[in-house]
Every structure is written in structure tokens, then in C-alpha cells.
Amino acid sequence: MTDEVERDGGPGRRAFGGGVLALGGALVIGAVPGAAASPGRGTGVPCEAVRGSARRTTLRHGSAERAGLLAPHLDGLVADAERFLAPSPTHPWYAGAVLLAGRGGTVALHRAIGSAVRYAAYDEKTDTGIELPPERRIPMTEDTVFDLASVSKLFTSVLAVQQIERGAMRLEEKVAAYLPEFGGGGKQDVTVRQLLTHTSGFRSWVPLYREPTREGKLRLLWAEPPANPPGSAYLYSDLNLISLQLVLEEITGRGLDALLHDEITAPLGMHRTRFNPPLSWRPGIAATEDARRPWSGLDRGMVHGEVHDENAHSLGGVAGHAGVFSRAWDLAILARTLLNGGAYGRARILSPASVELMFTDFNTAFPGDAHGLGFELHQHWYMGAMATPYTAGHTGFTGTSLVLDPTTDAFLIVLGNSVHPVRSWRSGSAPRVAAADRLARAVPVRPARGRTSWFSGMASATTATLTLPPVPGAARLECALWWDTEPGADPVALEASVDGGTTWRPVPFTTDGRAEHPTGTVGGWSGRVWHAVSAPLPGAGALPRWRYTTDQRYVGRGVYVDGLRLLDAAGLPVFDEARPADGARIEAKGWTRSAD
């Protein structure tokens, strides 16, 4: 679940340009951390996390309009989430959830649904939850605290990057230089960077909880051999962040819980984020699982107010991979801090250059497993249409997730108690994807010219066609194109037919006068900017069309087409959709006129 780094282990210093860029109708200053120039006319991806940024946006509740978002799609986000309180398809995905979505400094959606505590136990014989009487159930509230599970890894990663920034730890240093015992089992060459990017070679999990003492658990870790040679493969592993915890505690002389408080939560005012929440918090915490063998490694009954993860529990509730409890608002503060370039209000916890590294893909050798320092990048399986090469996030086994999209300055938090009453009821990430798709759609895309443009929609398993009429003398098609699709799966194609639509052939085209698309298709991420398309038509009477096809899994933000024109050999327009009579002749199947 390497890019440029200086050999002294400090933050990389890749130069990237700033400037003002129109994107989705909003003006944002700066460039995304680690981003190369956009493939189109844009010079970079906008983001507040830019070296030298002085802006320190803080959060406030506000309207969708104030956030630069479209209210109907935020309303749809809540409606979609509520559907997963019902069987989906066999059992509810969660008993309840807290949803938070925002853009810039505005939290435009903060909603609680369902129950924080609904079940007393799980009946494995009937595969049903034993429900509490209504008066004993605890409803979900906006301030409900959740066991974040693996979202905890982000806090450990921030703490590690802080130490790298301060020179106390080196990114390319071997872990054994800090913990000599770690080198056992053939791990002597594993580096700090490999722990942060899950390329150390560790297998995904080891039942440390079976060892009764901390010393015994450490012996298992020291002796654990790599499943793969370090640096040769990506394999998500809890052991990476447990090891990083031990490094942090060794070099600072402080426990991870003290580091979390002193270096992150206290400076940022995250007052409901900590390891081992006190008993007084228990009524405001979402319950997790009726933990019993064989589905759990430990017999604990209904877990409520204590960490769910067995290894974290056996480590006293303080672990690098799991154990942090938090609420949606506190996570929004963390999201805003990182999108601000490491600062929130008067507090700064990271430099912009360090944030850049957290949003930079170090795993380019492992396509599909993009990873910054701690953050996963570009993962459609839970980021949905918010996913771009620079979108960062993480999920937690208990049903939690955090997604940051620097390209639109948007953030999404979905906290669900999806292992309540048992882990087997939850499967996949459908609620996370649905919420992310809605928030992505809520960010408007303004037409390239005029009041509306053609929009393909965001439905999966569909084909949408936008067909122009045959026009005598037409030799070239020109238009503006905006696309954001699932990479490698959902192409948008320019085609033409010379037999009245019986057969269709690809039409090669160029974008912005320089980028060639010889197959007549594009897909993936276009930088969320408009691109100028030019394409020669294959002959007199040709029937040109745009075709967008999606598979059954994930979708991107979709495709927009605007300013459709057909030119003759002299470059004069013989068809222009801006002329009402011409525009009326376009045949749209699945495409609609959209102002946003």
C-alpha cells in the first residue's frame, strides 16, 4: 500500500517553477512539489507547498461557493456515503462515518452519519452483529475520534522527515547505522528511504504479538530476513514503520508518543490526536471489532477506545505503523499544513522542501506503486477521480482514509468504523472512491471559451461519442481538449469515418502544436489544463468524432471538448460550433453541455 535526493541525506533541492496558473477555473499560486512542467500549456501544477511560500492558510467552515466547489456534488457525496450504511452488497461497509471535504482554507463539508457504536458483539454462527439496544448505541458526531490504523504511518513519516530536515537522520543512510541489531537476517543494507517507501524487502507482516516481551518482539524484528533484496521491489509492510519508530526513538531519546505530541499535535493544535486515548475520551470514540480468534490474532472482545491492531496493542498502543487516534477536523489541519508547505497559522513543522519530498515519487522503478516519503501517490483504488501523479494519501484497515490533491488544493477525509463488528464485513474501498469522485467533480472546470463545453461525464463501463457532421471542404479539425482519465484503461480517441459511420479509423493529432499523438488517443492526466488540438482529416466528407470509453473499475475527472471547428485547406472555418446552426448539427451520445 527515488527521485532527486542529495547524497548527504538532506532534502532534495530540485528546482521547480512557480507562477500563476488557471486550473479548473481557479487561480492558485506556485507549483506542486516534485512536479515537472505540465504536458500542455501550463508551466506547472499549482500547489501552496512551494519553496518560499509565505501563505499559511488556516481552516474555517464555509460554503461550497466560498471553497470554489459545486454544492450539488458535495450533497451527492453525503448521499453516496449514506448508501454504504445499508448492505453493500451483503453487509454494511461501516456502521457510521465522518466525512470532511474542503478546498483552500474552507471546510465545505463536515458531516457525521450512522453510529459510532452499534454492536455489542459478533455472532460468527449466523454472521450477524448483535446490536445494542437503541438507548445504548452511540451516534456518530463530527468530533468522533477514530482508530486511524495505518493512517498512523503518516505521522511517523512526518516525524522522520523532520529529523532528516534537521540533519539528525540521513535519508540514504543504512538503518543499521542507527540500530546495529537491525542488520541481522541480511538487512544490513536497508536504508531509511527504503523504509519510508516500502522498498526495504520486508514481508508485509509478522505476528509480533505472539512474543510476550518487548525484547522478544525486537529479536523477531532483528532476525527477520528480507523477502526481497532491498531496493528490488515494492512490498507494503508494517515492519518498515515499526523499524522507523525505533530509529526515531534511538536518535531523539524520546518515545514516539512524546514526539507526536511535541512535534506535530501540540504546535498545530490537534487536540484530539494521540496514542492511547484516556478513558474520558471513550464515549466519543468509534468502536472497532469484536476481536476473537480465528479472525483476530487476540481474544479481546469488542475493542473500543484501544488500538485495534494486534501488534500495536502488544507494543503498548504506541507503534510506528498503527495506534494513533484522531478526528476528522484534526486530520484536516494536517492536510492543510502539508498543502501549505509545512505551516499552519504561526506554526511550522516542516520546510516546503521537505514537504516536496513527501509528495515526490521515489518509486518510479515500480509503476503503479508510486510513493513519496510516507505518502502513497496516484492510487485510483481509493483516491478515485482525485488521483493525479501528485495526489497523496493513505488508508487505514479500520476504514479510515486521507487524500490531498495539490493540483486543486482540495482535501478529503473519510473516517468509517468498517471493522465494527467484524473485519470480514468490509471489502474494497467503494465508499472512499465514491466520495473522492464526488469531490473531484465538485471542482469546476471552466470552458475554454464561451459559457459551456462538452463534458463526457464520469460514469464507468460506458462509451460516449461526440460526432461532427461531414462538411464539404473540411481538411482539418481544431478544438480545445481537457482530459483526466484512469491511466492505461480509459482512452479518449479521435476517429473518423469516410463511409458514413460504418467503420471508424484513428485520426492522429497534435496538442499545443508540439506533442504528437500518432494513435489518435490520449489518456491519463493532462495537467488539468486545456490543450489545443489540431488534426488533419482523412479525406473529403469525413465524419470526425471524439470517443471516450471507460472500464468497469475507476474513472478520472473525465474529458471536456470545446471550440470545435473544421477548417478548409486555406485555414478558413467551414464549421464552427459557436455558430448556432453548426452547433446544432453535433450528435452527442453520453456527452452533455456543461458550464463546469
Image (spheres, rainbow, N blue to C red):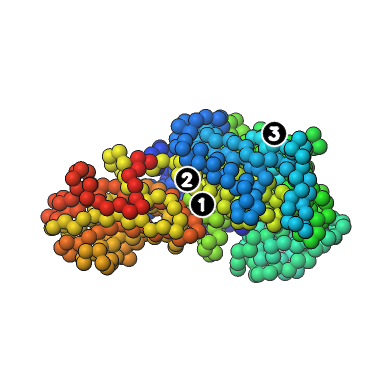
**Is residue 10 visible in this depiction of the protein?**
no
Question: Residue 270 falls in which quadrant of the image?
Answer: top right
Q: Contact (CB < 8 A) between labels 2 and 3?
A: no
Q: Residue at x 44, y 59 (%)?
A: 461
Please tell me how crowded label 3 is: few (under 14), some (14-19), or many (20+) other residues with Cα within 10 Å: some
Amino acid marked by disc 1: Gly
User: In the rendering, at what x and y percent does residue 170 appear?
Assistant: 64, 53
Q: Contact (CB < 8 A) between labels 2 and 1?
A: yes
User: In the rendering, at what x and y percent does residue 311 appear?
Assistant: 77, 55
Q: Residue at x 16, y 56 (%)?
A: 471
Task: Name the residue beneath numbered marker 1.
Answer: 384
Judge left or right: residue 28 versus residue 258.
Answer: left
Q: Residue at x 62, y 37 (%)?
A: 112
Nearer mark to the viewer, of 2 and 3: 2
Which of the two discs, 2 and 3, labels the residue nearer the N terminus?
3
Judge left or right: residue 315 versus residue 583.
Answer: right
Q: Label 3, secondary structure: give it.
A: loop
Nearer mark to the viewer, of 1 and 3: 1
**Is residue 202 visible in this depiction of the protein?**
yes
Which of the two discs, 2 and 1, labels the residue nearer the N terminus?
1
Task: Name the residue beneath numbered marker 2.
Answer: 440
Which of the two discs, 1 and 3, labels the residue nearer the N terminus?
3
Question: Residue 21 falls in which quadrant of the image?
Answer: top left
Question: Residue 445 falls in which quadrant of the image?
Answer: top left
Q: Nearer the viewer, residue 164 or 392?
A: 392
Q: Label 2, secondary structure: give it.
A: helix
User: In the rendering, at what x and y percent does residue 397 appear?
Assistant: 67, 53
Task: Name the residue beneath numbered marker 3.
Answer: 271
